[in-house]
Image: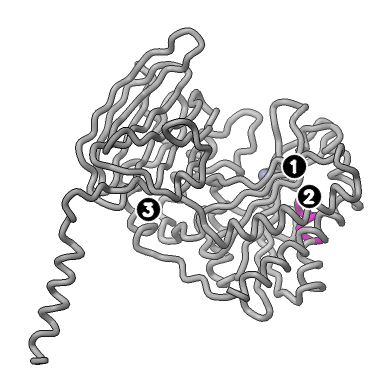
Amino acid sequence: MPFTLRPLLILVSCLLLLWPVPGRAAALERVLLFLGQEHARVLVLLDGEVGEVQSRSMPAVGAAAARSVFTLEGASIDPKLVEAYRAIPGGVEIPVDNLGVRRLVLSQIGGDVQVAVDTMRARGVSTSLIGGRALLVDLLVPGAAPDQSLPDAAALQSWMRGVLNVTADVGPPRDRPRIVVDAGHGGHDPGAVGHAGTHESDIVLALARKVGAGLERELGAEVIYTRDDDTFIPLSGRAALANARDADIFLSIHANASVSPDVWGITTFYLDVASDAAAAAVAARENRAVVTAAGGAQDAADLVMGELVVSGTSALSRRLALEVHQSVIGQVTSTYGASRVHDIGVQTAMFYVLVSPRMPSILFEASFVTHPEDELRLRTPTFQNILADAIVRGVGSYLEVARDE
Ligand SMILES: [Zn+2]
């Protein structure tokens, strides 16, 4: 083969890659929702060019929510999104129930994707393209001022550059796994506070120490704590530490809270492992949005830049979450009996603290400090020991699986 042909072939194949394939619909890969007061911002990411977009808004009628709809012509829904969320006839539902937004519904209608956002009150809809492959949609209560705490288009663009260009390079865990154990809150931030006066920050510190000691003892892990005393650590610093130390696993430990004293149980969350680090520039904004979005009795530090809504799934974080969660539920059930365990399950959410770590990461919610029985049990060393042992066993199972793959 003449030596001049090779570069030409490469050039041609590059052109083919860059050339839009006619008739192929761009797939909707991610939907991110940023919540502010009376203002929600939806970022829709596709794997190709955004085509024509139509939008409209409908008022609430009777018990039916108000609905804002935008339609992406010539688009499809990435199957990973379908897997990740609740399937309903004709589409997928993403429940939100926060700050006036009830839910998102994604539907494939012929060759188009319709995104419907159900809200308590009708909202004006405006759309703009950012970066060709992303659509930014603002849903604003009429007369309300845009919420300045939400990330703006420039911030989102810099975040996307990071997320879309940086692929997480997750190798097998080390023989001596390096694990960052993150006790939530601390210092001037007590986290959730129970009726009996329990501070989440104290409970999770005690639990984190037990988990860390167990990981060292049982798994020979190298444990790094984000905090080992009652000090405040910014959310962005927690993931940054895990990244700087190139940890194999990031475990964030929290206790949950609800405005209702009846809500109780155990949950494990995970997020996309490929979430970016280069998004540091956006972090400050997100942090402000966290405070705005959370407000009131909610656990500010547990919420992200608004609530959630992630891409498909991160297989490794999901696996880690499942192993830990199953181990905990199994152990707590066998100790206390099924009637004293409420298994909320493994869930995904866009927790701020899970946005940037570049390794499999989970956020464990040990129970509700706002539930009287959960609160009292959380304070007992017995319960903390059971949780810690079960978390360690779950991590051990995960490591076995991850090493085999
Ligand atoms: Zn918390």
Q: Gap between marks 1 and 3, in whole Å? A: 34 Å
In the rendered view, tell whether residue 8 sits above or below residue 324.
Answer: below
Q: Is residue 205 magenta?
A: yes
Kindly identify which residue carries mark 2. Answer: 329
**Residue behind mark 1:** 343
Q: CA distance from mark 1 to mark 2?
A: 7 Å
Secondary structure beneath dot 3 equals: helix
* Circle 1/circle 2 CB separation < 8 Å: yes
Q: Earlier in the sequence, mark 1 or mark 2?
A: 2
Residue interval drawn in magenta:
202-210
Q: Residue at x 85, y 47 (%)?
A: 333
Three-letter amino acid code at disc 1?
Answer: Asp
What residue is shown with label 3?
Answer: 159
How far from the left and from the top, in percent, is residue 234?
A: 58, 52
The percent position of residue 371, horizontal first and vertical second, equals: 80, 32
Give whichever of discs 3 and 2 has the lower sequence position. 3
Task: Answer whether residue 186 is visible to the viewer in this image.
Answer: no
Callout in the foreground (3, 2): 2
What separation in Å lies between label 3 and label 2 (alpha carbons)?
36 Å
Nearer the observer, 273 or 282: 273
Residue 241: numbered disc: none
Please state if 385 lies on the left or on the right of 318 as rendered: right
Where does the image place residue 159, in percent across and percent down from the top left?
A: 37, 53
Q: On the image, which quarter does residue 190 sit in?
A: top right
Q: Earlier in the sequence, mark 1 or mark 3?
A: 3
Q: Which quarter of the rendered picture does the C terminus lie within?
A: bottom right
Q: On screen, 49 above or below 161? A: above
